[in-house]
Image (cartoon, helix red, strand yellow):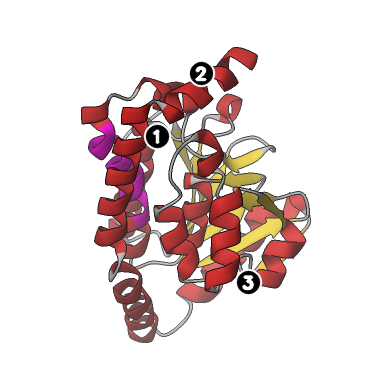
Protein backbone atom coordinates (compact mmCIF):
# COMPACT_ATOMS: atom_id res chain seq x y z
CA UNK A 1 0.00 0.00 0.00
CA UNK A 2 1.11 3.56 -0.70
CA UNK A 3 2.87 4.96 2.35
CA UNK A 4 0.73 7.14 4.62
CA UNK A 5 0.97 8.28 8.20
CA UNK A 6 -2.82 8.55 8.64
CA UNK A 7 -3.66 4.92 7.83
CA UNK A 8 -1.84 1.67 8.42
CA UNK A 9 -2.24 -1.89 7.20
CA UNK A 10 -1.92 -5.02 9.31
CA UNK A 11 -2.05 -8.36 7.53
CA UNK A 12 -3.65 -11.27 9.39
CA UNK A 13 -3.14 -14.19 7.06
CA UNK A 14 -5.33 -13.26 4.09
CA UNK A 15 -7.35 -10.55 5.87
CA UNK A 16 -6.07 -6.96 5.80
CA UNK A 17 -6.87 -4.65 8.71
CA UNK A 18 -7.00 -1.07 7.42
CA UNK A 19 -6.64 1.16 10.47
CA UNK A 20 -7.51 4.86 10.62
CA UNK A 21 -4.48 6.28 12.40
CA UNK A 22 -5.32 9.64 13.97
CA UNK A 23 -6.05 8.53 17.54
CA UNK A 24 -5.37 11.95 19.08
CA UNK A 25 -8.34 13.33 17.12
CA UNK A 26 -10.53 10.23 17.60
CA UNK A 27 -9.59 9.30 14.03
CA UNK A 28 -11.50 12.29 12.68
CA UNK A 29 -11.71 12.54 8.91
CA UNK A 30 -9.54 15.04 7.07
CA UNK A 31 -9.24 15.15 3.29
CA UNK A 32 -5.86 13.46 3.66
CA UNK A 33 -7.28 10.63 5.75
CA UNK A 34 -10.30 10.21 3.46
CA UNK A 35 -8.08 9.93 0.41
CA UNK A 36 -5.80 7.46 2.19
CA UNK A 37 -8.74 5.23 3.18
CA UNK A 38 -10.21 5.27 -0.33
CA UNK A 39 -6.81 4.60 -1.89
CA UNK A 40 -6.14 1.78 0.54
CA UNK A 41 -9.43 0.12 -0.31
CA UNK A 42 -8.64 0.25 -4.03
CA UNK A 43 -5.17 -1.21 -3.53
CA UNK A 44 -6.36 -3.98 -1.23
CA UNK A 45 -9.17 -4.89 -3.59
CA UNK A 46 -6.55 -5.43 -6.31
CA UNK A 47 -4.20 -7.39 -4.04
CA UNK A 48 -4.41 -11.11 -4.78
CA UNK A 49 -2.98 -11.94 -1.34
CA UNK A 50 -5.97 -10.31 0.39
CA UNK A 51 -9.37 -12.03 0.68
CA UNK A 52 -11.13 -9.53 2.92
CA UNK A 53 -10.76 -6.14 4.61
CA UNK A 54 -11.47 -4.98 8.15
CA UNK A 55 -11.79 -1.27 8.86
CA UNK A 56 -11.03 -0.07 12.40
CA UNK A 57 -9.60 2.88 14.30
CA UNK A 58 -6.33 3.36 16.12
CA UNK A 59 -6.51 3.63 19.89
CA UNK A 60 -9.32 2.41 22.11
CA UNK A 61 -11.65 5.43 22.14
CA UNK A 62 -13.01 5.77 18.61
CA UNK A 63 -13.53 4.07 15.30
CA UNK A 64 -14.02 7.50 13.71
CA UNK A 65 -15.62 10.57 15.27
CA UNK A 66 -16.66 12.12 11.94
CA UNK A 67 -15.10 15.04 10.11
CA UNK A 68 -12.21 16.89 11.69
CA UNK A 69 -13.78 20.07 13.06
CA UNK A 70 -10.58 22.10 12.79
CA UNK A 71 -10.42 21.41 9.05
CA UNK A 72 -14.19 21.74 8.61
CA UNK A 73 -14.17 25.14 10.30
CA UNK A 74 -11.71 26.45 7.71
CA UNK A 75 -13.51 25.10 4.63
CA UNK A 76 -14.51 27.84 2.21
CA UNK A 77 -17.78 27.92 0.26
CA UNK A 78 -16.13 27.03 -3.05
CA UNK A 79 -14.27 24.11 -1.46
CA UNK A 80 -17.32 22.35 -0.03
CA UNK A 81 -18.03 20.03 -2.96
CA UNK A 82 -14.46 18.67 -3.10
CA UNK A 83 -14.17 18.48 0.69
CA UNK A 84 -17.47 16.63 1.07
CA UNK A 85 -16.68 14.56 -2.01
CA UNK A 86 -13.44 13.25 -0.51
CA UNK A 87 -15.38 11.75 2.42
CA UNK A 88 -18.19 10.43 0.23
CA UNK A 89 -15.65 8.70 -1.99
CA UNK A 90 -14.88 6.39 0.95
CA UNK A 91 -18.48 5.18 0.87
CA UNK A 92 -18.33 4.61 -2.87
CA UNK A 93 -15.06 2.66 -2.61
CA UNK A 94 -16.43 0.40 0.15
CA UNK A 95 -19.35 -0.42 -2.11
CA UNK A 96 -17.15 -0.87 -5.19
CA UNK A 97 -14.75 -3.20 -3.36
CA UNK A 98 -15.64 -6.74 -4.43
CA UNK A 99 -14.08 -8.27 -1.33
CA UNK A 100 -15.81 -8.31 2.06
CA UNK A 101 -15.42 -5.08 4.04
CA UNK A 102 -16.25 -5.42 7.74
CA UNK A 103 -16.26 -2.52 10.21
CA UNK A 104 -14.69 -3.28 13.60
CA UNK A 105 -16.18 -0.54 15.77
CA UNK A 106 -13.67 -0.12 18.57
CA UNK A 107 -15.30 3.03 19.98
CA UNK A 108 -17.32 6.04 18.85
CA UNK A 109 -18.58 5.94 15.26
CA UNK A 110 -20.15 9.31 14.52
CA UNK A 111 -21.09 11.23 11.40
CA UNK A 112 -18.79 10.16 8.59
CA UNK A 113 -17.48 7.33 10.76
CA UNK A 114 -21.02 6.09 11.34
CA UNK A 115 -21.64 6.22 7.60
CA UNK A 116 -18.46 4.27 6.84
CA UNK A 117 -19.83 1.59 9.16
CA UNK A 118 -23.29 1.64 7.55
CA UNK A 119 -21.98 1.01 4.04
CA UNK A 120 -19.66 -1.79 5.17
CA UNK A 121 -20.83 -5.36 4.65
CA UNK A 122 -21.19 -5.99 8.38
CA UNK A 123 -20.50 -4.27 11.69
CA UNK A 124 -18.94 -5.73 14.84
CA UNK A 125 -18.88 -3.64 18.03
CA UNK A 126 -18.44 -3.84 21.80
CA UNK A 127 -20.72 -2.70 24.61
CA UNK A 128 -18.97 0.67 24.96
CA UNK A 129 -19.46 1.63 21.32
CA UNK A 130 -21.65 4.68 20.62
CA UNK A 131 -22.78 5.59 17.15
CA UNK A 132 -24.97 8.07 15.35
CA UNK A 133 -25.44 11.07 13.13
CA UNK A 134 -24.69 14.27 15.14
CA UNK A 135 -23.95 16.66 12.22
CA UNK A 136 -27.10 18.68 12.76
CA UNK A 137 -25.74 19.77 16.14
CA UNK A 138 -22.67 21.16 14.38
CA UNK A 139 -24.77 23.15 11.94
CA UNK A 140 -24.33 20.66 9.09
CA UNK A 141 -27.49 19.26 7.46
CA UNK A 142 -27.90 15.53 8.01
CA UNK A 143 -28.45 14.46 4.40
CA UNK A 144 -25.98 11.78 3.36
CA UNK A 145 -26.29 10.10 6.75
CA UNK A 146 -30.06 10.14 6.45
CA UNK A 147 -29.72 8.46 3.07
CA UNK A 148 -27.55 5.61 4.38
CA UNK A 149 -29.84 5.16 7.39
CA UNK A 150 -32.82 4.88 5.02
CA UNK A 151 -31.33 1.60 3.78
CA UNK A 152 -31.32 0.23 7.34
CA UNK A 153 -34.14 1.95 9.25
CA UNK A 154 -37.74 3.04 8.89
CA UNK A 155 -38.74 6.65 8.22
CA UNK A 156 -39.66 7.58 11.80
CA UNK A 157 -36.45 6.31 13.44
CA UNK A 158 -34.38 7.86 10.66
CA UNK A 159 -36.06 11.21 11.26
CA UNK A 160 -35.45 10.95 14.99
CA UNK A 161 -31.75 10.19 14.65
CA UNK A 162 -31.16 12.68 11.82
CA UNK A 163 -33.02 15.54 13.51
CA UNK A 164 -31.82 15.06 17.09
CA UNK A 165 -28.25 14.01 16.37
CA UNK A 166 -28.26 11.73 19.40
CA UNK A 167 -25.84 8.84 19.65
CA UNK A 168 -27.04 5.28 20.15
CA UNK A 169 -25.45 2.91 22.63
CA UNK A 170 -24.35 -0.47 21.34
CA UNK A 171 -27.35 -2.37 22.66
CA UNK A 172 -29.86 -0.08 20.93
CA UNK A 173 -27.81 -0.19 17.72
CA UNK A 174 -27.84 -3.99 17.87
CA UNK A 175 -31.61 -4.06 18.43
CA UNK A 176 -32.11 -1.77 15.42
CA UNK A 177 -29.89 -3.92 13.21
CA UNK A 178 -27.23 -1.23 12.82
CA UNK A 179 -24.72 -3.53 14.52
CA UNK A 180 -24.58 -7.21 13.62
CA UNK A 181 -22.59 -8.57 16.56
CA UNK A 182 -21.46 -7.42 20.00
CA UNK A 183 -18.32 -8.94 21.49
CA UNK A 184 -15.84 -7.97 24.17
CA UNK A 185 -13.75 -4.89 23.54
CA UNK A 186 -10.60 -6.94 23.13
CA UNK A 187 -12.24 -9.24 20.58
CA UNK A 188 -13.72 -6.68 18.16
CA UNK A 189 -11.00 -6.80 15.49
CA UNK A 190 -10.52 -10.57 15.82
CA UNK A 191 -14.25 -11.16 15.38
CA UNK A 192 -14.40 -8.81 12.41
CA UNK A 193 -11.55 -10.77 10.81
CA UNK A 194 -13.48 -13.99 11.42
CA UNK A 195 -16.55 -12.50 9.76
CA UNK A 196 -14.51 -11.34 6.77
CA UNK A 197 -12.94 -14.81 6.48
CA UNK A 198 -16.38 -16.40 6.58
CA UNK A 199 -17.63 -14.18 3.77
CA UNK A 200 -14.47 -14.77 1.74
CA UNK A 201 -15.00 -18.54 2.00
CA UNK A 202 -18.36 -18.35 0.21
CA UNK A 203 -18.54 -19.46 -3.42
CA UNK A 204 -16.89 -16.49 -5.15
CA UNK A 205 -19.35 -15.84 -7.95
CA UNK A 206 -22.31 -16.04 -5.58
CA UNK A 207 -20.58 -13.70 -3.12
CA UNK A 208 -19.59 -11.11 -5.72
CA UNK A 209 -23.00 -11.05 -7.39
CA UNK A 210 -24.77 -10.76 -4.04
CA UNK A 211 -22.59 -7.83 -3.00
CA UNK A 212 -22.99 -6.32 -6.47
CA UNK A 213 -26.77 -6.29 -6.06
CA UNK A 214 -26.54 -4.52 -2.71
CA UNK A 215 -24.11 -2.09 -4.37
CA UNK A 216 -26.60 -1.36 -7.15
CA UNK A 217 -29.36 -0.68 -4.64
CA UNK A 218 -27.16 1.53 -2.46
CA UNK A 219 -25.92 3.59 -5.40
CA UNK A 220 -29.40 4.27 -6.78
CA UNK A 221 -29.84 7.33 -4.58
CA UNK A 222 -26.20 8.10 -3.82
CA UNK A 223 -25.55 10.82 -6.39
CA UNK A 224 -28.83 12.54 -5.55
CA UNK A 225 -27.99 12.48 -1.83
CA UNK A 226 -24.51 13.80 -2.56
CA UNK A 227 -25.87 16.73 -4.57
CA UNK A 228 -28.43 17.51 -1.88
CA UNK A 229 -25.67 17.33 0.73
CA UNK A 230 -23.47 19.77 -1.19
CA UNK A 231 -26.32 22.26 -1.61
CA UNK A 232 -27.35 21.93 2.04
CA UNK A 233 -23.83 22.49 3.30
CA UNK A 234 -23.25 25.40 0.96
CA UNK A 235 -26.37 27.10 2.30
CA UNK A 236 -25.39 26.42 5.91
CA UNK A 237 -21.83 27.69 5.39
CA UNK A 238 -23.11 30.78 3.56
CA UNK A 239 -25.15 31.60 6.67
CA UNK A 240 -22.16 30.88 8.93
CA UNK A 241 -23.95 28.33 11.10
CA UNK A 242 -21.35 25.51 11.07
CA UNK A 243 -18.46 27.94 11.50
CA UNK A 244 -20.06 29.49 14.59
CA UNK A 245 -20.81 26.15 16.26
CA UNK A 246 -17.37 24.74 15.47
CA UNK A 247 -15.57 27.90 16.61
CA UNK A 248 -17.36 27.72 19.97
CA UNK A 249 -16.49 24.04 20.33
CA UNK A 250 -12.85 24.55 19.41
CA UNK A 251 -12.57 27.48 21.82
CA UNK A 252 -13.95 25.37 24.68
CA UNK A 253 -11.61 22.55 23.72
Q: Secondary structure at mark 1?
A: helix
Magenta: main secondary structure: helix
Magenta-drawn segment? 80-91
Query: Disc 3 designates what residue?
Result: 177
Residue 139, x across and y down, in percent = 48, 36
Which of the two marks, 3 or 1, is nearer to us in this view?
Answer: 3
Of residue 76 and residue 40, the one placed in the foreground of this image is 76
Query: Disc 1 designates what residue?
Result: 33
Q: CA distance from mark 2 to mark 3?
A: 35 Å
Which of the two marks, 2 or 1, is nearer to us in this view?
Answer: 2
Viewer can see residue 193: no
Q: CA distance from mark 2 to mark 1?
A: 22 Å
Residue 43, x across and y down, in percent = 30, 50
Of residue 60 and residue 116, the one placed in the foreground of this image is 116
Of the numbered discs 3 and 1, the one sitting upstream in the chain is 1
At label 3, counting other C-alpha atoms closer than 10 Å, the crowd grade (few under 14, some 14-19, many 20 or more) is: few
Of the numbered discs 2 and 3, the one sitting upstream in the chain is 3
Viewer can see residue 111: yes
Q: Is residue 73 above or below residue 54?
A: above
Amino acid sequence: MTASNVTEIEKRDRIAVLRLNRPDTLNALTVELAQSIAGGLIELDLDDTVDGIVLTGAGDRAFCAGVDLTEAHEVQFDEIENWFGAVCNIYRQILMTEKPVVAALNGVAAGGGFQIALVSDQRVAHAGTRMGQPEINAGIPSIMGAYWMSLHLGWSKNQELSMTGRLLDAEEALALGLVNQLVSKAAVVDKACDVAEGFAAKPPVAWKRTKARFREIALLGFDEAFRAGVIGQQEAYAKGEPQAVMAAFLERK
